[in-house]
Amino acid sequence: MAVLDNLSTGKRERIKSPVVFYHGDLRDREFVKEVISKEQPNAIYHLAAQVSVQESLKDPVGDAQTNIVGTLNLLDQAVKNKVQKIIFASSAAVYGTPRYLPVDEVHPAEVLSGYAVSKLAVEHYLAVYKNLYNLDYTVLRLANVYGPGQLAGTEGGVVAIFTQNLLEGKVPVIFGDGEQTRDFIYVKDVVTANLAALNRGTGKIINISTNRPSSVNSLYKLLQEMTERVISAEYRPTRPGDIRNSVLANQLAIQLLAWQPSFSLQEGIRQTVKEWNSLL
C-alpha cells in the first residue's frame, strides 16, 4: 500500500509503516506519473482535495487546479498503468440547497460553490473515463465526516473545532442560529464504506451517511457533556454558501455496498473526545 499526499492538512507521523509514503502534489504531472508507474496499483482511493468551500469562493482557479486538474493527472496515469478502479470521495455539497429531505442520489445537483463544482466535475470525468477507457469507479458522496485525527483547522471539521475550543477553554463560534442540521458520520464508518466499494458499486454514485439529521446546537450540547466543559458559544451571521438543512439517504449504500453505519453520534463523539483528551 502506498500514500501520495502533499501534507497541506495531514501529518507525516500518522502514516505508519509498512505504508510507502510519497510526498508530493497531484498537480505535478511528472510526480504523479512517477508514483503510479512505480507502484502499479490495482485500485486507487482518491481522497485528496482542496476542501474549503470558503476558499473555493475566494480562489476558484486554485480550487479547480487542485480538485479538477489534479484529478485528471491521476486519471490519465491510471489509464496508462492499467489501474482497475478508482474510489472517489465526493461530497454532499453537490446537492446544494435540498429540495427535499433526506437527499437521495437522484436529487438534482445544484452547486453553490467552486468546491461543489469541482467535485461534480470529477464525477462526470469518471463517467467519461469509464466509457472511453473502461476505468471502473465508485463515487462516495460523503456527509459531514468527523472523528479522531481530524484537524480543528479543516473545513467541515466542526466537531474538531468545538472539541479543541472546549478543552482549551475557548469560546467556539456558531454561524447562524445553530438550528441548521447536518448528517454527521463517524470516520470509521467511512473507512468501512470505502473498503466495501473496492469490489462493489461499479460505476455508481452512492451517499455515505447516517440518514439522521443533527442540529449544530444539539451537537455542541453533546460535546459539552462529553468534555465536561460548559462554555456559551458565540453566534455569528451565516456564511455565504452555507445551507440550512442537510441529511443524506443511505438506502443505496445499504443495498449496493452491503454497508451501514455502526456508530451513533454519541459513541462517535465519545471516541473523538477520548482521543483529544489523550493528547492533552
Image (spheres, rainbow, N blue to C red):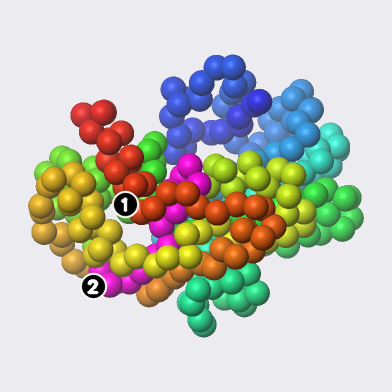
Q: Secondary structure at mark 1?
A: helix
Q: What's the residue type where badge 1 is placed?
A: Gln
Left or right for 161, reference 60: left
Q: Are marks 2 and 1 in contact (CB under 8 Å)?
A: no
Location of residue 125 with respect to 190 vertically, above or below:
below
Q: Which residue is mark 1?
A: 266
Left or right for 233, reference 102: left
Q: How many marks?
A: 2
Using the image as rendered, state which of residue 224 and residue 231 is in the foreground: 224
**At 50% across and 52% down in the image, what residue appears?**
261
In the image, which disc is placed on residue 177? 2
Using the image as rendered, state which of residue 224 and residue 65 is in the foreground: 224
Q: Residues within 10 Å of mark 1 (few under 14, many from 20)?
A: few
Return the x and y of residue 120 as percentages of the image width and height. Answer: 64, 63
Q: Secondary structure at mark 2?
A: loop
Q: Give the Cα distance between marks 2 and 1.
A: 22 Å
**At 17% across and 41% down in the image, what residue appears?**
167
Location of residue 112 with respect to 205 vertically, above or below:
below
Q: Is residue 171 magenta?
A: no
**Quadrant where the C terminus is found in the figure:** top left
**At 72% across and 60% down in the image, what residue appears?**
204
The residues colored magenta run 178-189
Query: Looking at the image, can residue 93 be seen?
Result: no
Q: What's the residue type where badge 2 is placed?
A: Asp
Return the x and y of residue 236 as percentages of the image width and height. Answer: 21, 67
